[in-house]
Amino acid sequence: MSDAPTRSTQDWQAADAAHYLHPFTDFKALAAKGSRVIAKADNIYLWDTDGNKILDAMSGLWCVNVGYGRRELIDAATRQMTELPFYNSFFQTATKPAIELAELLAEVTPPQFRHVFFSGSGSEGNDTVVRMVRRYWDVLGQPGRQVIISRRNAYHGSTMAGASLGGMSGMHAQGGLPIPGIVHIEQPFWHELGRDIGRAEFGLKAARWLEEKILEVGTDKVAAFIGEPVQGAGGVIVPPETYWPEIQRICDKYHVLLVSDEVICGFGRTGEWFGCERFGFRPDLMTFAKGVTSGYVPLGGVMVGTRIASALIDRGGEFNHGYTYSGHPVACAVALANIRLLQREGIVETVRDDTGPYLAQQFAALAGHPLVGEVQTCGLMGALQFVKDKTSGAPFPTELELGMVCRAHCFGNGLIMRAVGDRMIVAPPLVITRAQIDEMMALVRRCLDLTLADAVRHGWV
Ligand SMILES: *Cc1c(COP(=O)(O)O)cnc(C)c1O
């Protein structure tokens, strides 16, 4: 290997294009263009190999919640690496950080959660969910309950089970997905599906699609329903307040397990510790990853509610499932440091009481922008929906790829904001200050105006 600092950006890009297949990427197109190589980071900022400073309004990939460069996490990893870099939890062994983290998770999660099963990622966590809910119904003597209901445009990861639970048509189109026993209902996206009625009424209507699906599949065949409290990768789709309580009522009525995928919403993103607390429902299982370690090292898992834990512990015998890195001691040590930092600095409360409401106010002010139809925020997540006609909400033709036009301006102006179709989304680190939100909003406005200028020039508006 050559000496890293002496390599030019072009050199990095050439080696990247020659050998590295990136996730969710058109390999050929990227190789022609060259990737942006990120070299270092601090707080909410990144620097690329050309020395450009970039404001990371996506927290890496929704995960660097405490910001980059936090000593507490680095020291925890270093200490644990030195003392015990790895040991597994398979054969009646455990490690101190894994035990301590299980204990702390039981403390910070809602009261029905006393147990955790660790994985290495969110996708793996959702694979565990599939195995566990089916195992639960077996143990209870109802092996006919196998079907898991999910939603269109959900994101639950990229493994076979994760991508099947997810409702992304592009992912289902490759590799023969979804796997059997997973069915989908429509998403609670008012802007797309409910503009003819009020948000509250639409929330109830969208929840009742679950009831219809349960009755269609058969009440003795449905094992669980899974959803993200707020759909993240789907475009920061914040459901109406009426949605989740009605979902809870329906799951209770038909004894269907309720699974909250908290991989994005967990650990403060919504202004509460967990999204289910923000939206007022009580899941039986809760998947987590990303924010549990602020992304410094990979870790995921599933919080297991007492109803399921008791059945599996008392009557289940051996659960034939687990990962080499379940309860990885370094990952668990970093998670401990991360959660203690969230607690010590009151970061979740700051999002709830100060920076979250401030972001909401700043985003609301963009509703008047000529391109923007719907504006939504929840905690420190925000979405701006581009529309061609502000009154009717009519979209731009998809082939214009206006979201990608805007994203290119963000790229050129030192801002990482993501495009999901024509929906621009942000999810900055939870430690972002008001002044930094102002700085981010100035960049957002500049990029929206540049996008508008393009649209005007091309005669799209
Ligand atoms: C990112 C994500 C996942 C997948 O997590 P990985 O760690 O990428 O496997 C699952 N669910 C949700 C809601 C996510 O945002």
Image (tube, rainbow, N blue to C red):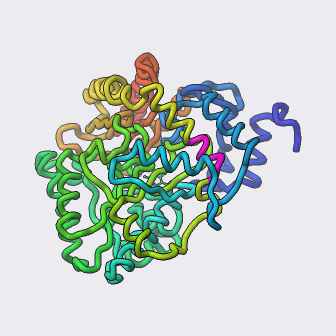
Looking at the image, which is closer to me, 227 or 362?
A: 227
Residue at left 37%, top 25%?
Answer: 355
What is the span of residues highlighted in magenta in the rendered image?
Answer: 328-335
Q: Nearer the viewer, residue 428 or 10?
A: 428
Residue 397 seen in this snapshot: no
Give the residue at the far top of this rendering: 435
Q: Main secondary structure of the magenta part?
A: helix
* 142 displayed left or right of 233: left
Q: On the image, which quarter does residue 81 sit in?
A: top right
Picture layout, residue 229 above or below residue 59 = below
Q: Quadrant of residue 53?
A: top right
* Position of the C terminus by quadrant: top left
Query: Residue 442, image x and y in percent?
Result: 42, 20
Q: Residue at x 40, y 19 (%)?
A: 434
Q: Residue at x 24, y 46 (%)?
A: 280
* Whether residue 70 is situated above or below residue 314 in the rendered picture: above
Residue drawn at 82 percent across, 31 percent down: 5
